[in-house]
Amino acid sequence: MVSRVLSARRGRRRRASFVVLLVSALVATVAVGCGSGSSSPAAADDLVLPLIVGLRRDDARLAEEALRRSTPSDPDYLEWLTPEQVVAGFGAPAERVSSVLATLQDAGFTGAADPTAGLLVGSMRAADAAKFFGTRVVQVPLGTSGSLAMPERALKVPKKLAGDVSEVIGLTMLLDADTTGPVPAPGATPPADPACPPSKGLGGRLHSHYGLDPLLEAGSTGKGVRMAMVEVSPTSQKALQLMAACRPFRVAPVTVVGADASSPEAFASKATESTLDIAAASLMAPGLDGIDVFQVNPYAPVAVGLAAALTRAGSEPAGSVPQVVSLSLGFCEPQVTDAEIAVAERLLMGAALMGTTVIASSGDFGSSACAPDDLAEAVQYPASSPWVLGVGGTTLVSNAGEITGEVVWGANGFGGGGGRTSRVPRPSWQADIPVEGKRIVPDVAFLANPADLGAIPTCDLADRCTWQVNGGTSATAPGVAGGLAVIMQSLAGPDGRPRRLGALNPALYAMERAGKSLAGTHFIDIVSGSNDVHGVGCCTAAPGYDPASGWGVVDFGVAAQRFAAVISRKAASG
């Protein structure tokens, strides 16, 4: 699948729907609407578009509490709040929620508050949105890639809501993308399945290399965990059936949920990225209860898919939020608006306070996240959020079929994302990292090289499938999320349910410092290779933390021991 770069309107604000990257694929850049947009036709009046409204509340206090409960040295570490407790202690006042919601509903809005009462999440018809926000919703052509519905002018909070609302984002949707290829007619004979390619035995090698063997042998396989994934590509059940039939690992049951009102025609004609992500998670956690895929159009703010994942009732009592969320998507951070980051951060802080772990891939353009339009050093969001574990990419080093190590993935203009240029403030747990900058990305790394990951089934709308070599950091977030699911089951409490671990970075960084003093580590350090694939001067791997590979790849077996030791000390202290 081509790693597409999609640019839109004034300022060339770009959305990168990033990656599953087919070896030898070219990068397509589409520039649109650089003028005022007045010549673009209006979108259809009845087009339903996603909309998120940020309510005024005390986010600083919520952030402080989420960080405290995610820090191993705090007495309340791992003591998570229910959605109801978050609303009662940190949400916008009930009268504010009701008042704003009523005003929006009168204007045609359909939706509700998120689990933390910080946002109103829903949708509006294009005609209603244009009237309420005072700007047309236009439809901008994207060449052969369909068209983009978007506000003609940047959204602003209406005066009638200014005292109660801090941000308004959304009203963007990709329409009629490339869906070339036949759609199966009712009753048509299904195409023949392609033969299974030879297996590399990657699963067993990765389990051993990443320290999962002791956990798997003890019966911890991710059972009891339902993973949420946010995807911008279609999901093919046929491809998953082929994967299960041809590969020696169990593929988790998958449910697909539309995160917005996008039609199937808004997505590519072939399903590749979601197949890779589901395979990576299933490979690492063969006992997952299931994966809920939230499909969102690639021009929607990241908060749209994230809100859908966090508001959907889970398998635990009381509609619990997911235990872990994997985001194999990202946006060039310099071109993400302050409002979009603020709204996403509200969701991520709330998720952390409820014990949900969010993991995001760091991108496929190395230390130049805005490539190919802009090759300057840049990072991707949401991997650069302090509430997200950002995951870079590696390439295996092997000898006679045995994995002997890893290096940073970076070649031919592609590589694991990472760098020093985030505008997100440096979090406290990175205070002593010897790298200049604000939030440094990534935190950890995982296998991303397409040649190492091997072939996966790629199917079109008619269920015609081929096996193709794919990869990229799209595989890294679900891969780490799968390993984490195994750890979560291994740490199950007296009730037998996997233990929630919340925002991981405060604990991982703290445990690494403690481990160094004991001459031990729960990371396999990556000390060679570079993600400087465009000659910007960053970043090269070195001993210890670096912005090419973070701390390195996780040894999940040792990490489980570290978490268990912290939990035991907490229990012993009362």
Image (tube, helix red, strand yellow):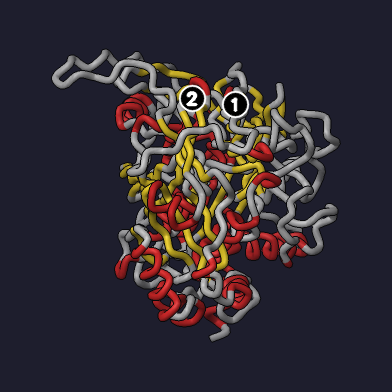
Which residue is painted at 60% across and 23% down in the image?
A: 28
Q: Extreme bottom residue here?
A: 574
Residue 215 x %, y %: 48, 52
Let me know if residue 171 appears in the view. Answer: yes
User: Is 45 located above or below residue 59 in the figure?
Assistant: above
User: Is 125 located above or below residue 199 in the figure?
Assistant: below
In the image shown, does 436 or 343 lie closer to the viewer? 343
Residue 182 lies in quadrant: top left
- The amino acid type found where label 2 is placed reads Ser
In the image shown, does 192 or 223 lie closer to the viewer? 192
Which residue is painted at 32% across and 23% down in the image?
A: 461
Q: Secondary structure at mark 2?
A: helix
Report the residue marked by disc 2. Answer: 145
> For mark 1, does the 10 Å Cα neighbourhood hold few (<14), some (14 to 19), or many (20 or more) residues?
some
Judge from the rendering whether residue 17 lies leftward or rightward of residue 417; answer left or right.
Answer: left
Report the residue marked by disc 1. Answer: 30
In the image shown, does 566 or 225 lie closer to the viewer? 225
